[in-house]
Image (cartoon, coloured by chain):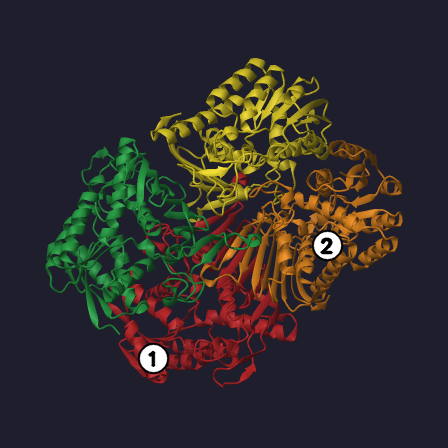
Chain colours: A red, B green, C yellow, D orange
């Protein structure tokens, strides 16, 4: 039975605000612990929107200024669900106020910002985490376990793709509500920061740091109407971003992301080829981990489609849900992340990715964008 | 904003008690309506278990006698999550008390019980529903829409299977907590009532009533230790149940369920072959509806794998969740069912399956078990 | 180097005449042996067609009367590729003439005919075989090996389907060139003899004899223009045939075939569920054997997709073809069958299915059609 | 009926010698034309091997010196199936002798050699072709048709991979029979010339010329025993080769090949993302073309799995084989290529890829290897 409370102050009310709120509400039922999560306050500049969001999700109060939220003594955790260009300022202020911080990904607009943020949370000694939620899809977590057990042997190749198709239309505007991801001033970059950031975070977690990269970016639609200015403006983001590189362990990287891959909605796939085992995962079929085990008998060796839904410790997180064969959703990865964050508080071993972990992803992002610009190989 | 409350009294705290509770908690966030669901009371014979369940899920109070729960004026809806042999008595009492009733499937132990239950709820004029949740998996709901739009043309074949493998071990006991599904006195039947009931409900919904059947059942393990008596006793349930038959519309039925299909966890699959279109669905990949459209151009005709995750009205329920490509879980089907139940209350058009609808499934179940016994074709 | 010749006399020139001829031509290159196959004579009633076929495929001579072909002393093997209603007469005559016989499936129109044919070849002591070619798809042959090695353990379930959709049009005529399979007088039955015969042959080979059955057949289109009479006549064949039953080993059978399953071209699938292992195969992806091995470690247990293309003895027949990953065609199964027939001649251990083996399939076919007629369970 | 002969002189007797010979033998049966292919002479330095090969495949005569073969007046076509380092010399000599030439891929060791070869065949005016057989897999040919019909719209992305795993063992030697592909002096390069060459040929055919590239290669095992010298020697080939680049039409390229991708035998996959349609193909399931058609109705839009086996003109080449649903093998792609070569002779429009076409692939190969060496972007 929970004996402590964890009062959450949520900044933002969009897609991620909803996903995180759902996780806060579910965690106590599926992953009971000593901590009870309380939805204390929801913060948005627009008061009506803040009120509606608070009412729908059960937040006890609202704020319209994030500085006031941070100043409140009854807030333990600040959850930053704003567009990317606000992460730094809010995070540093929250750290100074001694709040725990859960920040949406990517950590920051660039390495420089990220370094400031890391310095701030470490100076303040506050718990911190970045919402790279795909680490907590059970099939991905199982992949991590297989790697940590040494089952893959020497790694030769790591491939990751994140393909979408929702911006293939010349008349889609940029900027403003729901479209800030197309506005470079707010998002910082295009698919690299939005989608490849996920791929890179998982890759570093599974396969260690990257060494160097060569990158190609493209902006297929050069100008779009800007919702905030009402003018047609140059598009500053990368619509597509592809890079090759090397990991420190000698394996080769092939990464690609685009919003111009017709037929793909959110096709995050990853494949790792090791001497003894290869694994493959696809977000569109998120419960399936494909494993090729070279140690299997040759006669019946093949790619195994593991439906990671057993309610046993073999399948991470699943013992807390339903019965074998029954799926959980994308949303559950957030519930797992909150559960792990709390477990980290209770055990004293912080769950990752911390701000410091997430800074490594920013280093790769900066390197690839520099390479795309210079047409040179760039060290991470 | 919700202006009315719907106070739920939950009887039971097992797998289904958890699934329904999660749905009650989620529905207001994802499918806001005029009704606010309140978890009013949880009921279980064992007080400690009732308390623990109430605490974990947020029920305001507990009861240890379902008759007391039903008698409470502050309960609007009774949710029956007990084993099958208690459905009838509770439902009839709840109806008499004027409560709305949400009953776990199958409706009853047999047709005779089911008829009494239907009579009771209809006499009382209370809203009622049975938790055949698979109707509310978005891909299955989409299948229903395609059929209702007449896209399949004349139907020739309907095939359904529900395959599991969890009882393949001679030393698994029967009866008691978690194993009552193996005890014929409590469950009424084996895979027929537990698994085929789902397949039959969906089939009648999608393809209309059945006419006649020939059935084969098998009990592979003849005796098992009974947890309640401590003795090895004959196993009375069907471990496997297969039947062929005809629907009223002239199409042919092939249904099969078993708990002895090694490699299958909860493999509910259905396929319908129509003159113009065929469809296929598999619970293990619950977001994918496979569609073969004969009206497609011959050159590029093939089975389409539709990832039913668009957040648009094209994909049922999904506009209320995340963004295209991102999965929801098995659990969401219950959330949808509560949402539809409430919408039925608000619109005056009750959402199905009502008790009367579910009685049709009981008729098929009785017919197949009679056929298995008599080795004759039996009319439904 | 081949030192003996095997002179083939081919009766028929249709789909199967071509498939067998291709096999005769290929076998010496891919499966060299002591026997050289010689395409000695092609026989068809229509002289022009016989000549054209012989010229295209390299037959040295032609006949227009199968009795003359059988009488020729330079013919060693008679290959019967005629419609089903001629199998018996030709086979018995060929046996009396001392010829080896390779007969297209099904062996005969019914059990009575089949018994006469078996008696004839056994009395004559001539080598004989029926073209149930699917036994020689490498993935299916591998399945047989796994079963013979006892890997599946006790078998609980055997499922087979053969689904097509090519007769879904009311204006398709019956009878005559290319459409004799719709004419009951010539074909003997519909999908049962044409398609289920394959499924039954494989099943008996893999899982042993069947005991009893209950069957349902349907003729969706009741009348069709008859090409030979020019009149609309009743359709006598089964368009769909489904049956349940028991094998002698206690496992349950679920078989289905139809030509009204929109979206399926030649979807022969089979699945066997054993206590320790399950296997699945689909003719549309003929190189893939799906295997679920319960003895795999729980954490990474899943269905394995084995691409049966290794050029090693692990993968039957494949060492004689290309390199790993590269597919052979449906046609290769016939090449393998000729290779095995020759190996049987050379070793003295005849390759199956012999006429006697194929008679068992006829017994099941007669039983299911009797059951469909009587609406009773029928013993095989 | 064939009225002309095409006398083939085959140089080489390995994997490709067998594949081409099978095609020469089959073409007359499946793709009858005015030309009858005659297996006139097989040439190999080792007389015993030449004799054995000729006997098995039915070549009428043998030669042990390719110069003599070329000098024979009864040879119309020279088929070069030697290792790569001999292509140029033989091809130029054959051209001078006025022979038609079918040359194994890659055309040459590099662009310089290729240019000499193109000059030679064009000066001599002899028919010429390179065995990039994957163009003639029916699913790939269908892809070409869809593109030529303009169905894909503007192309954004082209991805191709060719993954194998057969050299993942440090003790595998290099050089000599069966292993010359590991010997840079004979093969010219590693996976780039062996595997990526196929991907590049298909890409140029489907998507037009490439503009510039950045490439990464790796040799995982640095030294191997050399079979010809008996010494451990440095490995000169690329074990893995990845490159990014741009096509002239503005689409982005992502290509990768390796022999260190555990679990992949011959995994040639390609995907093209166009504004209106995307397509995907995988050699391991060679009959399936996956197509996503954005013009499909949104409600039932998804990737279609087209089983390219209809015996109609809709599915290239398939009308000449079996019936819908029945696969042909990898080998058939060579049969198709011979059929197209002959059709080119008869129509006067040469079938591709000619030497000149194949030279474009060499230009890309040279560019990527130069980029891998210089760590710079290189123009093709």
Secondary structure under tag 1 reads helix
Which of the 4 quarters of the picture holds residue D110? bottom right
Which of the 4 quarters of the picture holds residue C318? top right
Vertical arrangement, residue C124 with respect to residue B216, above or below: above
Residue A374 location (% of width, % of height): 65, 75
Residue C228 location (% of width, % of height): 56, 33
Name the residue beneath numbered marker 1: A49
Q: Is residue A65 left or right of residue D356?
A: left
Name the residue beneath numbered marker 2: D189
Vertical arrangement, residue C284 with respect to residue B30, above or below: above
For residue D24, the mark is none
State yes or no: discs 1 and 2 in contact (Cβ < 8 Å): no
Q: Nearer the viewer, residue B373 or C325?
A: B373
Secondary structure under tag 2 reads loop
Q: Is residue B113 left or right of residue C93?
A: left
C-alpha distance separating marks 1 and 2: 63 Å
The quadrant of the picture occupied by the C terminus of chain A is bottom right
Q: Nearer the viewer, residue B184 or D318?
A: D318
- Same chain for mark 1 and mark 2? The answer is no
What residue appears at the point 56 percent right and 64 percent down from the top-left corner? D276
């Amino acid at each position: 039975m929970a004996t402590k409370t964890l009062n959450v102050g949520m900044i933002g009310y969009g897609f991620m605000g909803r996903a995180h709120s759902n996780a806060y509400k579910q965690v106590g039922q599926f992953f009971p612990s000593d901590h009870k999560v309380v939805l204390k306050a929801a913060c948005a500049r627009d008061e009506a929107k803040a009120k509606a969001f608070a009412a729908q999700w059960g937040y006890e109060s609202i704020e319209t200024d994030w500085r006031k939220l941070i100043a409140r003594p009854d807030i333990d955790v600040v959850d930053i669900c704003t567009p990317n260009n606000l992460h730094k300022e809010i995070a540093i202020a929250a750290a100074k106020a001694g709040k725990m911080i859960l920040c949406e990904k990517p950590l920051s607009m660039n390495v420089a910002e990220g370094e400031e943020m890391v310095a701030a949370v470490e100076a303040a000694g506050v718990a911190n985490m970045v919402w790279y939620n795909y680490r907590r899809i059970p099939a991905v977590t199982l992949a991590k376990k297989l790697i940590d057990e040494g089952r893959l042997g020497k790694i030769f190749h790591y491939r990751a793709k994140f393909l979408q198709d929702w911006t293939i239309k010349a008349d889609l505007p940029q900027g403003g509500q729901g479209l800030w991801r197309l506005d470079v001033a707010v998002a910082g970059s295009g698919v690299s920061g939005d989608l490849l950031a996920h791929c890179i975070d998982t890759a570093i977690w599974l396969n260690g740091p990257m060494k160097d990269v060569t990158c190609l970016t493209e902006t297929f639609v050069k100008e779009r109407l800007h919702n905030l200015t009402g003018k047609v403006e140059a598009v500053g983001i990368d619509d597509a971003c592809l890079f090759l590189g090397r990991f420190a362990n000698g394996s080769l990287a092939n990464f690609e992301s685009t919003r111009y891959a017709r037929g793909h909605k959110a096709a995050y796939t990853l494949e790792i080829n090791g001497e003894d085992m290869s694994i493959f995962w696809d977000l569109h079929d998120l419960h399936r981990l494909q494993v090729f085990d070279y140690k299997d008998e040759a006669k019946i060796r093949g790619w195994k489609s593991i439906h990671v839904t057993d309610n046993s410790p073999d399948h991470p997180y699943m013992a807390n849900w339903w019965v074998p064969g029954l799926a959980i959703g994308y949303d559950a990865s957030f519930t797992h992340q909150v559960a792990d964050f709390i477990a980290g508080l209770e055990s004293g071993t912080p769950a990752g990715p911390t701000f410091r972990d997430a800074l490594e992803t920013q280093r790769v992002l900066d390197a690839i964008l520099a390479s795309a610009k210079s047409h040179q190989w760039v060290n991470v």
